[in-house]
Amino acid sequence: MQLLRAVLLLFVLPIHGQDTTSEGIEVLPPLPKGACTGWMAGIPGHPGHNGTPGRDGRDGAPGEKGEKGDPGLVGPKGDTGEIGVTGDEGPRGFPGNPGRKGEPGEGAYVYRSAFSVGLETRVTVPNVPIRFTKIFYNQQNHYDGTTGKFHCNISGLYYFSYHITVYLKDVKVSLFRKDKAVLFTYDQYQEKNVDQASGSVLLHLEVGDQVWLQVYGDGSHNGLYADNVNDSTFTGFLLYHDTN
Ligand SMILES: *[C@@H]1O[C@H](CO)[C@@H](O)[C@H](O)[C@H]1NC(C)=O
Ligand SMILES: *[C@@H]1O[C@H](CO)[C@@H](O)[C@H](O)[C@H]1NC(C)=O
Ligand SMILES: [Ca+2]
């Protein structure tokens, strides 16, 4: 109620035009109090003109710090970096699956060549191939029992050996290849003894080469001997065939 009364008073005061000192409002000289007594009040004057606006007030104190803004947009993709250093070798992997079975090779029989033969009787004829007619092995028939010669049918490296029983006479025996003696063995016979003479050799042969044993010299050293219980043998076989 007091606030309302104060507002009403504010309106009433300018209407009477008394005690107003604001700029722009005409100040009327105060009437003598005693002169108004008993007189009718006059018509209220018009309200004065509005005053000019006042100056701007001072700036207010800075406000509180605002809230943090939203994150900005994602920037463009950067450049590709340099290649890094090669890392350490990893651990050994598990063994792989077994490979497929290989194709069948060439028939091995093609490269088989072997013989082993022996004497059946004493040798009496010198300077001709010694005929070994006791056949232990001659599957491929590369040894010819009618001539006493081995015929090379597969080129390659061959092994030859002979073990001769010597009886009654010395032995001088040679291994021939292509009409030429390449190995010589000499054994002197001891009276009332049975001796042995032997030899072995590796020879490279071409297809068509022939190999045999033969008594060399004047023919008096032909003490090669054999009976049921004393053998003289001649053996040969292909060790490696030529691959080209
Ligand atoms: C030698 O080999 C050929 C084929 O290469 C064959 O025809 C011939 O019978 C062989 N000779 C012997 C004695 O095996
Ligand atoms: C052959 O050897 C046997 C012993 O095994 C011997 O009894 C025989 O007399 C030998 N032959 C010759 C001609 O010496
Ligand atoms: Ca001897």
Image (cartoon, rainbow, N blue to C red):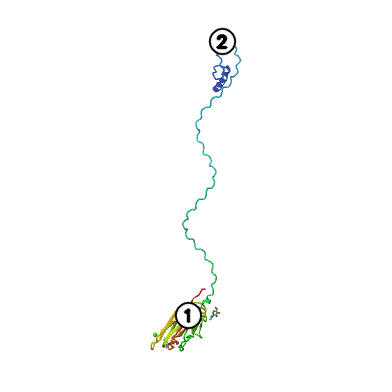
Q: Which residue is most to the right? A: 43
Real-space Cα separation, disc 1 to disc 2, in angstroms: 177 Å
Q: 193 or 208, which is in the foreground?
A: 208
Q: Amino acid at mark 1?
A: Gly
- Residue 105 in the image, given as x and y percentages of width and height: 54, 72
Labels 1 and 2: the sequence-earlier one: 2
Q: Is residue 131 above or below residue 84?
A: below
| Residue that carries the numbered disc 2 in the rendered image | 35
Q: Quadrant of the N terminus?
A: top right
- Residue 22 in the image, given as x and y percentages of width and height: 54, 20
Q: 158 or 11, which is in the foreground?
A: 158
- Residue 125 in the image, given as x and y percentages of width and height: 46, 89
Q: What secondary structure is found at the residue carrying circle 1?
A: strand
Q: Residues within 10 Å of mark 1 (few under 14, many from 20)?
A: many
Mark 2 vs ligand 1: CB below 8 Å = no
- Residue 65 in the image, given as x and y percentages of width and height: 50, 35
Q: Is residue 94 above or below residue 242?
A: above
Quadrant of residue 228 within the rendered picture: bottom left
Mark 1 vs ligand 1: CB below 8 Å = no
Q: What secondary structure is found at the residue carrying circle 2?
A: helix
| Residue that carries the numbered disc 1 in the rendered image | 236
